[in-house]
Image: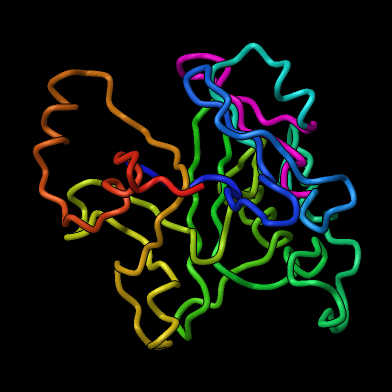
């Protein structure tokens, strides 16, 4: 299976907003200045600390680059830290109209309802990948505070991190649907707000893949048919990777 990852936009006025390290190679450094509106987007990171072990840490470019782990993805906001629902307090200006703020200002960006992706883990070290649909009459979405509450109260997550949301939110399970997409991406509803189907996924710069290690299981999975426009093909083909 695969899910979208962190904020991988490259800005004309500031560069990348996230840190990304895969298989020991740093693909992306945080290049935005501290005064940039989107600087907050690398507040925390999802780190693979062992074959089946993961950690969620709060830090910055310097810390992430110094860690001796092969796979690190930064994002924001941190939702739960060691059982504490810190995401409930990320937005400082919760009430009132926020149209005076830039769309990427954290108080506006994380207070609004919309599609969201979260990575989390439980006390017994289970990894949770949660896709929440939105921007539809059938699913309005969720904000950072509500996402924190849901993960904490219903899924019993002890640590959690909000990833890239909006039109990027995509969960792929090979063979589960004709396209492999099991959620309802919002991009395809730009022309038809009432459409609610497993299509419309955008091409994401990177993703988190969960692959079976047993050869027989892997071979069986690879034999499942998937439509050619699925997100897995977009991710696995380097030609489709966008900067």
Residue 242 lies, with reference to residue 181, above or below; the image says above
Q: Position of residue 181 (x, y in %)?
A: 30, 57
- Count of all numbered marks drawn on residues in the image: 0
* Front position in the image: 182 or 222: 222
The residue at the point 58 percent across, 17 percent down is 49
Q: Position of residue 235 (x, y in %)?
A: 35, 44
Q: Is residue 213 left or right of residue 124?
A: left
The residue at the point 64 percent across, 25 percent down is 55
Q: Residue furthest top?
A: 68
Q: Is residue 2 left or right of residue 137?
A: left
Residue 19 lies, with reference to residue 22, above or below; the image says below
Does the segment drawn in magenta span residue 122?
no
Q: What colouring does the structure picture have? A: rainbow
Q: Is residue 109 visible?
A: yes
Q: Position of residue 22 (x, y in %)?
A: 50, 26
Q: Is residue 122 visible?
A: no
Quarter holding residue 74 = top right
The residue at the point 73 percent across, 37 percent down is 44
The residue at the point 58 percent across, 53 percent down is 164
* Front position in the image: 150 or 91: 91
Residue 17 lies, with reference to residue 52, above or below; the image says below
Please provide the residue range marked out in magenta: 40-60
Does the segment drawn in magenta span residue 41?
yes
Residue 91 lies, with reference to residue 239, above or below; the image says below
Q: Quadrant of the N terminus?
A: top left
Q: Which is the main secondary structure of the residues drawn in magenta?
A: strand
* Front position in the image: 155 or 201: 201
Q: Position of residue 48 (x, y in %)?
A: 55, 22
Q: Is residue 88 left or right of residue 133?
A: right
């Amino acid at each position: 299976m695969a899910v979208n990852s962190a904020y991988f936009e490259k800005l004309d006025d500031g560069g990348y907003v996230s840190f990304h390290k895969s298989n020991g190679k740093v693909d992306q450094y945080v290049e935005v200045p501290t005064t940039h509106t989107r600087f907050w987007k690398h507040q925390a990171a999802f780190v693979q600390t062992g074959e089946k072990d993961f950690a969620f840490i709060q830090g910055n470019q310097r810390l992430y680059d110094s860690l001796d782990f092969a796979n690190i993805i930064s994002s924001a906001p941190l939702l739960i830290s060691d059982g504490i629902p810190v995401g409930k307090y990320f937005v400082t200006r919760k009430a009132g109209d926020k149209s005076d703020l830039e769309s990427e200002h954290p108080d506006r960006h994380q207070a609004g309802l919309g599609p969201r992706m979260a990575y989390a883990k439980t006390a017994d070290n289970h990894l949770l990948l949660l896709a929440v649909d939105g921007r539809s009459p059938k699913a309005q979405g969720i904000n950072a505070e509500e996402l924190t509450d849901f993960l904490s109260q219903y899924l019993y997550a002890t640590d959690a991190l909000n990833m890239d949301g909006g039109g990027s939110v995509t969960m792929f399970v090979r063979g589960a649907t004709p396209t492999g997409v099991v959620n309802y991406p919002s991009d395809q509803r730009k022309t038809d707000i009432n459409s609610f189907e497993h299509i419309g996924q955008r091409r994401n710069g990177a993703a988190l893949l969960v692959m079976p290690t047993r050869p027989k299981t892997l071979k069986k999975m690879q034999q499942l048919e998937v439509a050619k426009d699925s997100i897995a093909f977009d991710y696995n083909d380097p030609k489709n990777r966008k900067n």
